[in-house]
Image: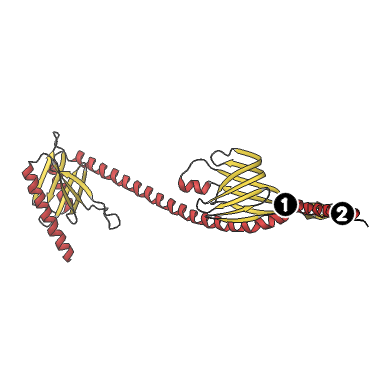
Amino acid sequence: MDSQTLTVILCLAAALAIGWLVYQEQLARPLRTRVLELPGCLRFEARTFQVEMQQAAKLVKVHTENGDLSQTALADGAKKVLSGPLDLSFAAAGLRIEVQRDLVAVPGDASAAASGHCTITFTASDALAHAVNKLPGGHESVLRISQVPGPVAKDFQSMANRVNLWAEKITARLEQDHLEQLRIEEELAKAESEKQLLAEKAANEADAAEELHDDFTSQIAKWRENAGFSGAFSEVSTNDQGKIIWFLDLAKDGRITLHANKRTVHTTLRGAKITALGGELEIAVRDDYWTEEDPTLSRFLVLKGIPPNERRTWQDRLERARDAFDGKADRGY
């Protein structure tokens, strides 16, 4: 065999080897996958789709060259369907990924056989996140990526498991936050309703009292009877019809009756705040609804129209009575 023939044979062998390698590459390329660990991010890459788990943003981003998306609006149930290349973002809360083998019927056999391909399904809902954050709109979404080669789907399964575990934790935490939010809102609404009912009841009682007692002296006598004491120091202001605008009745032991703005309270000066406000005196006291958990003081504006020197005398008298009462209470008698 001459050298020329040998050269031709070697060239043909090399061409066959290169062709075989190219063929093997073409077979392997659709099955090649990789997982990238990035700062705050985990990304799975395949030839026809990529999935990215963004931990800081609590999002999952999906790119597919051939997907089928079905979305239903939470507000009105309107549906939207998209197919083809898609770039989507799903909130982690409410997200679930499933990998299922595609089956094909076997002629003459009741059972089905694996086709060698799988379908990856992303099921997501904005309902929980939007409820917690009080956002309008939102969708329920189902994305299907079909005809995924079995080896690629197998590689993706570990990524899906990791995303599902992460999403479940976020969903559970958000559900707890939502339940706590609903509990607080319910308690606030109940408290506001009770407060309004009590205010309406107090206003109705005050209106009824004024209608029944045109003579303010009779009203003062009734208040003193209800309080169980008559103050050693008193001031009252009435309008042109003889109705009481404000009333202040202070006993020497620190008990006090206050009336202003159609509200009346029989209480003590325990923890009271006395503040001069221009031409009035504000007295903030504990009422029947005061508690350690809700230490809100009820405020009364009195002594409007009284000369400044008399208001100062009243302020000194009230502060001394409060301090004496607090001192006795602190000492337990």
Tell which residue pokes out farthest to the top in this image.
240
Q: Nearer the viewer, mark 2 or mark 1?
A: 2
Residue identifier under label 2? 7
| Residue at point 16%, 60% (across, down) | 326
Residue 263: x and y in percent read 22, 44
Tell which residue pokes out farthest to the bottom in this image.
332
| Residue at point 61%, 47% (across, down) | 62
Left or right? Give the position of 269 relative to 51: left
Which quadrant, please, contains the C terminus?
Answer: bottom left
Q: Amino acid at mark 2?
A: Thr
User: Cα distance, mark 2 to mark 1?
Assistant: 33 Å
Residue 130: x and y in percent read 49, 46
Residue 274: x and y in percent read 16, 50
Residue identifier under label 1? 29
If you read the primary sequence from the N terminus, does the residue marked by circle 2 or circle 1 appear first? 2
Residue 6, relative to residue 134: is it above or below?
A: below
